[in-house]
């Protein structure tokens, strides 16, 4: 495929935010493709070169890209900079500069594969002379590009491709392009993605071997699985009722979720909840896991929690978050903030996938293959049949430093449901007992400039929840409380790459911030209560026509959820459940009806 065809599809995608139109454009784009080109187009359309968990950064600094554009279009760099000031975007400037150029007469010649391998060379260039090399590769591409190709090549390397193709849209398009587009087909495609986290792989297998061929996509050591997630209930009575009267309760540890991949030989790899590789941040776990886990290759999951090594006591979560994203001082931090992995599930053992087995079997297997060490243990668990026993265990969990309990279904169908949030796991936290039941993870979609002491920086942020059905980010509050000055000073740096002049098409709000942001950063907030509002658009119309949900007195908890991508934020449906659970708590005599809790 010519890169021009891809660029023209991007142009069309930019012009719409209707999910059905986007899908039609994507279907037309990918249907004629076969591997490896198909996978390349899938990755590029998400602004990546490889599946996200491989951590290959496509990004190039603005200043380097500007030099490439200057060279590739034979323009003085100063002039390029001036034009960018006017257009606000180097991609647009590139296309302007290229369109003024005499045509070579031969039409677009660049292929997707050639562009993909050039972009890979840019991403992989390291060490001395790498900057020059990157500039040259991009300049060469630009010099051969048409105006529209140039625009998107530059946006790709800058990481600002704004065509809004998210995983869900690609899954939709794959099911239509390479199967019959039915619900069943869509579910199979998504199932394969949940197990492999690799859309390029899923697309390639689907295009070559059809829907049934997707059965060959299964767990592999080194390739993270999309995590199973929990629903919530407002009290232990409802938890038990939901589980059918009996459940396994485990401590809910407050730390970082870790998926550990332990090969037969070779290094252990650790992945976060967002499936980023975090092995280098926890060398002591990498070291100790092969000693603790038998029957490798294995994939196990657990929560990594800071502990007091002498007493085994759990320490506050904030301490372990200091170790996230650190490259230096790791040795010192290892000593200062010792961690323990409390394992709670096994997905692969002895090289065999076991995720489809019911939970009691997986737990028994976990206990069998794990010889606990100082830093690798098994989550504390008990089986309960009544509320009194559940309450006793909950209190014990909280006293031991947990944030509550996780209830897990023991039913025959209790397999590990990768990538899904459901009532097979239910969380119940200490904080549900007071005020608004839970904290909310909101995506920053706008910034408001501060006044007074905060003049010149952001003073408040517009937050949104995610609605996967509409693929939209719906606002629910403006938060300016809970930030200290140091953090406020840091926010512009963190948010810079998401800032945009136009309201992002995927954002739905009745407020206009001083600066729009594309959904990127996730903040944890708490508040007094959820109310109805004509301005905010979360779960709009679900409780009352023309009203969305809004959080009163929002307050940032101090926790930036780097472990979450925007689509992992609290969903509109969860916000609605929180709204309903607070209504229920306010009138305790009222019995919840079946239809009251969304399932
Ligand atoms: P939260 O913000 O409440 O931690 P989350 O959305 O990140 O929730 P949930 O699925 O809602 O994730 O809650 C489950 C999380 O709790 C898991 O992702 C995991 O990190 C953590 N956890 C702690 N202890 C356990 C346990 N025993 N079993 C399963 N998950 C546990």
Image: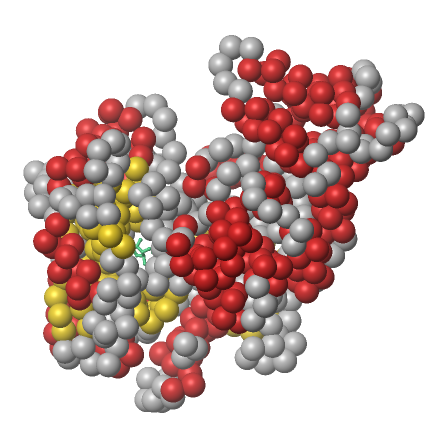
Ligand 1 visible in quadrant: bottom left
User: Camera-side residue: 58 or 309?
Assistant: 58
Q: Is residue 43 above or below residue 337?
A: below
Q: Quadrant of the N terminus?
A: top right
Q: Residue at x 40, y 59 (%)?
A: 215
Q: How far from the left and from the top, in percent, is residue 155?
A: 68, 35
Q: How far from the left and from the top, in percent, is residue 599?
A: 41, 76
**In the displayed structure image, the side of residue 133 where residue 291 appears, left or right:** left
Furthest residue to the top?
Answer: 128
Q: Is residue 561 above or below residue 402?
A: above
Residue 85: in sight, yes or no? no
User: Camera-side residue: 512 or 227?
Assistant: 227
**Image quarter of residue 122:** top right
Residue 67: in sight, yes or no? yes
Q: Residue at x 60, y 29 (%)?
A: 117
Q: How far from the left and from the top, in percent, is residue 22?
A: 68, 58
**Image quarter of residue 143:** top right
**Image quarter of residue 195:** bottom left
**In the displayed structure image, the side of residue 239 where residue 154 appears, left or right:** right
Q: Is residue 245 above or below residue 183?
A: below
Q: Residue at x 31, y 43 (%)?
A: 221
Q: Is residue 541 above or below residue 403?
A: below
Q: How many marks?
A: 0
């Amino acid at each position: 495929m010519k890169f021009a065809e891809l660029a023209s599809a991007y142009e069309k995608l930019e012009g719409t935010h209707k999910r059905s139109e986007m899908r039609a454009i994507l279907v037309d784009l990918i249907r004629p493709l076969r591997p490896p080109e198909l996978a390349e187009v899938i990755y590029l359309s998400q602004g990546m070169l490889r599946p996200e968990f491989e951590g290959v950064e496509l990004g190039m600094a603005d200043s380097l890209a500007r030099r490439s554009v200057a060279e590739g279009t034979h323009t003085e760099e100063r002039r390029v900079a001036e034009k960018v000031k006017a257009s606000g975007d180097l991609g647009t400037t590139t296309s302007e500069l290229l369109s003024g150029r005499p045509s070579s007469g031969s039409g677009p010649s660049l292929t997707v594969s050639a562009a993909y391998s050039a972009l890979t060379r840019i991403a992989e260039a390291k060490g001395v002379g790498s900057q020059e090399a990157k500039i040259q590769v991009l300049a060469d591409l630009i010099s051969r590009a048409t105006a529209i190709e140039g625009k998107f090549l530059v946006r790709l390397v800058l990481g600002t491709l704004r065509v809004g193709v998210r995983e869900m849209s690609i899954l939709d398009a794959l099911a239509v392009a390479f199967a019959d587009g039915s619900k069943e087909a869509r579910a199979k495609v998504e199932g394969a993605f949940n197990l492999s986290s690799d859309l390029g792989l899923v697309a390639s297998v689907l295009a070559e071997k059809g829907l049934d061929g997707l059965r060959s996509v299964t767990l592999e050591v080194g390739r993270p699985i999309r995590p199973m997630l929990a629903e919530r209930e407002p009290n232990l009575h409802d938890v038990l009722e939901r589980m059918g009267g009996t459940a396994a309760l485990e401590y809910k540890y407050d730390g970082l979720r870790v998926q550990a991949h332990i090969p037969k030989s070779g290094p252990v790899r650790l992945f976060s909840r967002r499936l980023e590789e975090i092995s280098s941040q926890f060398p002591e776990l990498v070291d100790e896991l092969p000693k603790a886990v038998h029957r490798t290759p294995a994939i196990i999951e657990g929560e990594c929690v800071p502990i007091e090594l002498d007493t085994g006591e759990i320490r506050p979560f904030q301490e372990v978050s200091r170790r996230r994203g650190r490259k230096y001082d790791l040795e010192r931090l290892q000593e200062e903030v010792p961690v323990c992995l409390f394992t709670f599930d096994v997905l692969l053992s002895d090289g065999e996938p076991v995720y489809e087995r019911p939970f009691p079997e997986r737990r028994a297997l976990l206990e069998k293959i794990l010889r606990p060490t100082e830093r690798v243990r098994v989550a504390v668990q008990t089986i309960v049949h009544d509320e009194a026993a559940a309450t006793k265990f909950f209190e014990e969990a909280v006293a031991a430093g947990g944030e509550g309990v996780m209830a897990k279904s023991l039913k025959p169908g209790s397999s590990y449901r990768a990538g899904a949030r459901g009532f097979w796991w239910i969380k119940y936290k200490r904080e549900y007992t007071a005020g608004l039941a839970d904290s909310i993870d909101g995506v920053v979609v706008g910034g408001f400039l501060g006044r007074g002491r905060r003049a010149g920086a952001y003073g408040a942020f517009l937050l949104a929840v995610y609605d996967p059905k509409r693929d939209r980010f719906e606002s629910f509050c403006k938060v300016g409380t809970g930030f200290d000055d140091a953090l406020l000073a840091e926010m512009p740096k963190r948010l810079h790459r998401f800032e945009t002049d136009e309201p992002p098409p995927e954002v739905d709000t009745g407020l206009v911030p001083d600066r729009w942001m594309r959904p990127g950063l996730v903040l944890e907030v708490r508040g007094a209560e959820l109310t109805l509002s004509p301005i905010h658009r979360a779960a709009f119309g679900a409780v009352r026509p023309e009203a969305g949900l809004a959080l009163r007195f929002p307050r940032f908890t101090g926790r930036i959820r780097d472990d979450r991508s925007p689509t992992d934020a609290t969903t509109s449906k969860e916000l609605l459940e929180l709204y309903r659970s607070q209504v229920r708590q306010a009138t305790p005599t009222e019995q919840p009806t079946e239809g009251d809790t969304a399932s």
